[in-house]
Amino acid sequence: MKSFDELTHQDMFFLLAGPCVIEGEEMALRIAEHIARLTERLHIPYVFKGSFKKANRSRLDSFTGIGDEKALKILDQVRHEFHIPVVTDIHSPEDADKAAPYVDVLQIPAFLCRQTDLLVAAARTGRIVNIKKGQFLSPDSMRFAADKVRASGNEKILLTERGTTFGYQDLVVDFRGIRIMQESCACPVVVDVTHSLQQPNQASGVTGGQPQLIETIAKAGIAVGADGLFIETHPDPSVAKSDGANMLRLDLLEGLLEKLVRIRQALR
């Protein structure tokens, strides 16, 4: 498994990618194998992403997971079978202790980035902590979230830009925020490409999205110097059980990564 320094101190950007939520063993292993093979060829440090449960759904009848223990064991299987780190979301301090034995990175959802007890619990596990910037926060405000983790004895912090609320049903990415967070928070900064293209709060209670703009946001993120990218992907987003409206189809990832590598190499 890659250490924090091995993941973040590279000439190449690193990638957090996988399905929104763990839907089952076969799907998770298929996606992990595909992306691990691509990233190894392209020399991109890779972290497999999959939520073991979804706690922040709009509707009560939304899919939330296949069971905590079952999903966490699948993440652990991915971790050991492909020798790659894995990341999952947590929503409570209890989740931090539950998930930490199975994963390498604990991710704090954007809505929860100010929850002190959650940040402290994540920090104390010793895992890498990836804090998503709240849709309601300025980039320089994220230094306070990072400071909570540091003050709890953990220096392994990532910050993730995932768009800022723009009206009731849209998000916009302010790419100035990448540099601002890198400098004011002294952390590697990730661009969450797919969540930045969500169209939340739809009348149906199901989030919409603009996946046709994934390449645009990803290219811009690398061009302005982001340290990493976050991309949710699925073999068939139309049948994904969560966030299918903004995910990248798995077979399109290779071509996108090849373009992004060329941009990174040109910047170097």
Image (tube, helix red, strand yellow):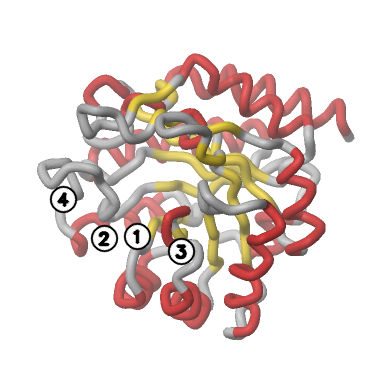
Residue at the (22%, 34%) spot, across then down: 205
Mark 2 vs mark 4: in front: 4
Residue at the (10%, 42%) spot, across then down: 61
The residue beneath circle 1 is 76
Q: Left of 10 or right of it: where is 149?
A: left
Q: 153 or 73, which is in the foreground?
A: 153
Q: Left of 26 or right of it: where is 15?
A: right
Q: Secondary structure at mark 2?
A: helix
| Disc with the residue nearer the chain's start (2 vs 4) | 4
Mark 1 vs mark 3: in front: 3
The residue beneath circle 4 is 66
Above/below status of 152 relative to 60: below
Residue 56 % position (x, y): 29, 51
Above/below status of 174 relative to 49: above
The residue beneath circle 3 is 106
Quarter of the picture holding the N terminus: bottom right
Q: Secondary structure at mark 1?
A: helix
Above/below status of 34 relative to 213: below
User: Between marks 4 and 1, how big is the CA–CA gap?
Assistant: 15 Å
Kindly check if marks 2 and 4 are in contact, taking CB atoms under 8 A apart as contact: no
Q: Specify the amino acid type for callout 1.
A: Asp
Residue 91 % position (x, y): 34, 64
Q: Quadrant of residue 93?
A: bottom left
Q: Left of 212 or right of it: where is 91?
A: left
Q: Specify the amino acid type for callout 3.
A: Leu
User: Between marks 1 and 3, how big is the CA–CA gap?
Assistant: 13 Å
